Amino acid sequence: MANDIEVTLVAPRYLAGPGDPAWITVPLHNACGWIIAEEPLMPRVILTSPDRQAELRLDPAPDDPWWRLYHAAAADHPAWYASFGARTPVELVAAVLNALTAPAASQGVASDPLEPARQAGWAWSPNACISPDGIAEIECFTDHGANSWFITAALSGDPENQLWQAHFDGNTPDYLVTAFTRALADPSPLIRDPMRLPPRARQRTHLRTEQLPAESVAFALEHRTTALSQRRAPSPAPPPAPPQAPQPRRAR
């Protein structure tokens, strides 16, 4: 059809490469009201939540995680931290931010971060899940009663073949870790430019082309931003006006 364009779909999604960082940063700013720190001479992006409790940093550092998410301590929860390597697909990181910025009533209760992978048929043990191809692994380490999570995509046990790693410290709320693992185990492919896939991963990916409406592809980021804007809890309705007192009758 004239209004369709051909795109390449990549599976499994954890081998699709990073994608466009704007998938995360634009909706955070435009839909969720996160504030941009202006540092025009620095090659990084810093976004702070409206309540100043959370900060997301995109810092292109070759030997360190590119994405870092910090959250200050709250009355009912200690401070926590998460990080994501440069090749972590942005859709996985966005799932965490989607959950974090959701209205409080829909953020969910404590959940088991391994459950999405188990439901997807990954091999599992009490503290880990491994994808059927052996590339992606979710590991949980317990230290002083707190669970610390490491999610890794690696083509072999050789450190040189690690593609990316995500880390959630022991204080990260479980529902946020679960948001990441649910996106990770999702079998749906991701749209990518095949020429920009991680070179070492190309032989392990499944590519297919598909015709999609040009409008849905060109405005995907705009649609995502709009959807996040619309999910905000509606403003409470104004209280009804008090009944008017009856006017005194005039004597004839």
Image: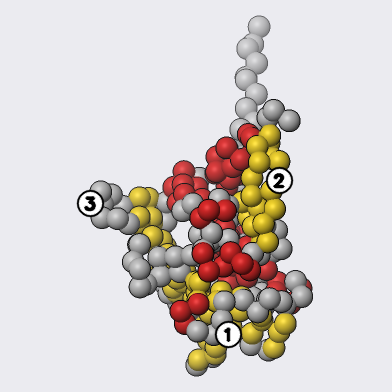
Q: Position of residue 117 (x, y in %)?
A: 70, 74
Report the mark closest to the observer, 1 or 2: 2
Residue 210 numbered mark, or none: 2
The quadrant where residue 222 appears: top right
Image quarter in which the N terminus is found:
top right
Instruction: Tell me the residue that label 1 is attached to.
Output: 140
Q: What element carries label 3?
A: loop
Looking at this view, is 152 or 49 the one in front? 152
Amino acid type indicated by mark 3: Leu
Q: Where is residue 115 in the image (x, y as percent from the top left)?
A: 71, 76
What crowding class fits label 3: few (fewer than 14 Cα within 10 Å), some (14-19), or many (20 or more)? Answer: few
Amino acid type indicated by mark 1: Cys
Residue 41 numbered mark, or none: 3
- Measured in 3D between alpha carbons, the distance from the residue under mark 3 to the one under mark 1, in whole angstroms, is 39 Å
Question: Count of labels shown?
Answer: 3
Q: Residue furthest front?
A: 203
- Measured in 3D between alpha carbons, the distance from the residue under mark 3 to the one under mark 2, in whole angstroms, is 41 Å
- Compared across the picture, whether 201 is left or right of 55 comes to right
Q: Is residue 232 visible?
A: no
